Image (cartoon, grey):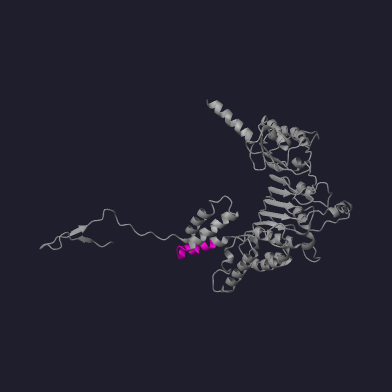
Amino acid sequence: MCEAVLLYPRPLARYPGRLLLLPLLPHRPSLKPLPSEIWSRIFVQALFEDDQNTQSHNAHNNIRRSCLSLMLVCKGFKEVAMPLLYSNVCLHSANSLQKFTAHLHSADRMWDSIRRIPYSTPGRWVQVLDLSALLAELDSSSYYAANALLTQLFPLLPFLAKLTLYSGFLLSCRALASLTRRDGSSNIRALDGIYYDPFIYSAVATGEDHFVQLLRVCVNLELLEVTGIGLDDTDFESHFDDAESLKTPDITVPLYLPHLRSLTLLSMPSSLLMYVLLHSPLPRLRTLSLTPYDDIPFPASLSSVFLETHGQHLRNIFFFTPKSWPTRYHSSPSTILNTSPHLRHLSLEYPLPALTLTFQTPLTGVSSPCIFPLQILSIPRPSSDFWVTLERLLPFLPSLQTIRMRDVQWLRHGMTSRAQEAGIQGEMMEWDRRLTRRGIRLLDRNWKESQVRECGIFKLSELAVF
């Protein structure tokens, strides 16, 4: 209850009067403080939901500055904003990695056993660790120091959910063992930019492949991106000679990855990792990025067998060969539409395969037509030979809406008509005219249509209005 307020309009009069001040509005009670969990959700919505790409360098700097500003408001905001600051860590130099590791070690030494939570802060706040920019600029002479720091850092991150490395950086066996044996290995959901060398990880005669051991404890893994060592040109002929003498390893226990939905295996014709994944059930695998090696027989190459085993439930397949010098392309399987009949997006690589369709009814054995739900087809460049294959497949692809040229870009608006009709641009213009009659869009590597076509559609719409 609020106290009564009396007004004295004539305090010096012989008989002064007193007036009772009545409030026009009822008394407003003070607001109750919001719990820290609600403030945390508000900050997450304000900081992370606005940026389309939170992994970019500019977006990460904006989030870091916003968290630092919130920490200066009050003690309550500091307790809420500090976990958000450490939740997404992106390091860009070896010095920053060393300071970050030292800071987490110092905080862990001061953490006592009286606390209700066994893991120290801020290490237990880290959920995303991005080291791709750091490792890409790192000199090869500094790899040992970086691996030593990562060996000390991984046990301090029990709730790490996403780890991003660089495909040119080889993680040491000690660092892999540290990542495997730490508490909270089941919390990992994404492993990006992993460089896999089967001659190092599988060199030990006793025991299992170090990276396979890591995958055995990552039971909640959803995304895996691995780049191998490729195929040496000097050993290319020996792969054909030794293909019959190679022995497949004995896999006693397959991997348990019930949540894996996206898998990338580049520059990897065969390895123990690929063989284990081949013989492991992957019920939720929907996206596969793979370097094709269809011209190399089994077991020297496992790519074609891998597609036959896990291709029934795939929705997206991306064939890609990492560019190096010299780049050696290998053929892709021509029966990819048969082994993966539920594809929505198919991206092909050089040399473009002559896709074939073979359908047989189970009773009569006579071929019968089938309809595929393919919607997007990506190829590196337009080719007159592949147009013959595509024209033959179009009756079986009624849902095809887009064809994308992965390595070509449309000329900017304002170029002459002769420039637009010359070379590869002329091929694309011819493809665009043919596909437009079939209701299919032709896009470049930036997922954009031809500006000439867009201007023509705009002018036709203006004429229709007038």
Q: Which of 187/236 is in front? A: 236
Q: Is residue 343 visible?
A: no
The location of residue 208, given as percent across then percent down, is 77, 63
The location of residue 269, given as percent across then percent down, is 79, 52
The answer to whether residue 261 is above or below residue 130 is: above
The location of residue 435, given as percent across then percent down, is 69, 32
Q: Is residue 63 visible?
A: yes
In magenta segment, residue 103: no
Q: Is residue 46 toward the left or the right of residue 280 in the image?
A: left
Q: Which of 95/371 is in front? A: 95
Q: Which of 172/12 is in front? A: 12
Q: Which of the 4 image quadrants contains residue 250?
A: bottom right
The location of residue 90, given as percent across then percent down, is 61, 60
Residue lying farthest left? 14
- Residue occupying image coordinates x 72% and y 67%: 144
In magenta segment, residue 81: yes
- Residue occupying image coordinates x 47% and y 58%: 39
- Residues shaded magenta: 72-83
Q: Which of the 4 image quadrants contains residue 442?
A: top right
The answer to whether residue 448 is above or below residue 52 is: above
Q: Is residue 414 toward the left or the right of residue 197 in the image?
A: left
Q: Is residue 76 toward the left or the right of residue 313 in the image?
A: left
